[in-house]
Image: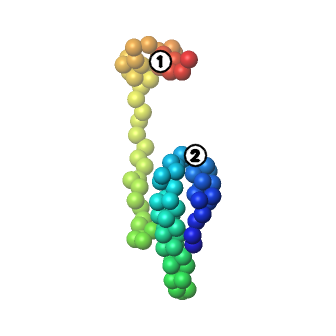
Amino acid sequence: MTLSAADIQRLAKLARLEVPENQMVELQSDLSRILALFDQLKVVETSGIEPLVHAIETSDVLAPDHVADSLDVQDVLKNAPVHDESFFKVPPVMG
């Protein structure tokens, strides 16, 4: 598949990229070669092969949850320079 200069300009606009004119031909060539590689993948025989989510089977990759006592609110607030009831008070971040 060959991309035209108009295709490259449209892609650049969609991606909100500015492509200098002196790089347009090189980008057009590079993207056309990449799309040609995808065309080669289209002819690979994949019937009878199940789709994979991961190449390697994984299970129980997360650590188990453990219930634990939480810290006392008053003990935590002792570390806060300023607090109001049970909340930390911080300076505004956005005006």
Q: Residues within 10 Å of mark 1 (few under 14, many from 20)?
A: few
Closer-to-camera residue (30/16): 30
Closer-to-camera residue (92/33): 33
Q: Residues within 10 Å of mark 2 (few under 14, many from 20)?
A: few
Q: In the picture, residue 59 is in which quadrant?
A: bottom left
Identify the secondary structure beneath mark 1: loop
Closer-to-camera residue (42/24): 24
The residue at the far left in this view is: 79
The reply to whether discs 2 and 1 touch (Cβ–Cβ < 8 Å) is no
Residue at position x 41%, y 61% in the image:
60
Residue at position x 45%, y 68% in the image:
54
Q: Amino acid at mark 1?
A: Val
Which mark is first along the chain, 1 or 2? Answer: 2
Could you tell me if residue 4 is visible in this image? yes
Could you tell me if residue 89 is visible in this image? no
Question: Residue 46 got which mark?
Answer: none
Identify the secondary structure beneath mark 2: loop
* Residue bearing mark 1: 90
Where the C terminus falls, by quadrant? top right
Residue at position x 57%, y 70% in the image:
2
Q: Up-down: is 20 above or below 70?
A: below
Where the N terminus falls, by quadrant? bottom right
* Residue bearing mark 2: 16
Where residue 20 appears, as percent x and y from the top left, is 50, 48
Where residue 82 appears, as percent x and y from the top left, is 44, 13
Its colouring scheme is: rainbow
Residue at position x 60%, y 54% in the image:
9
Q: Label 2 to label 1, Cα distance in Å? A: 37 Å
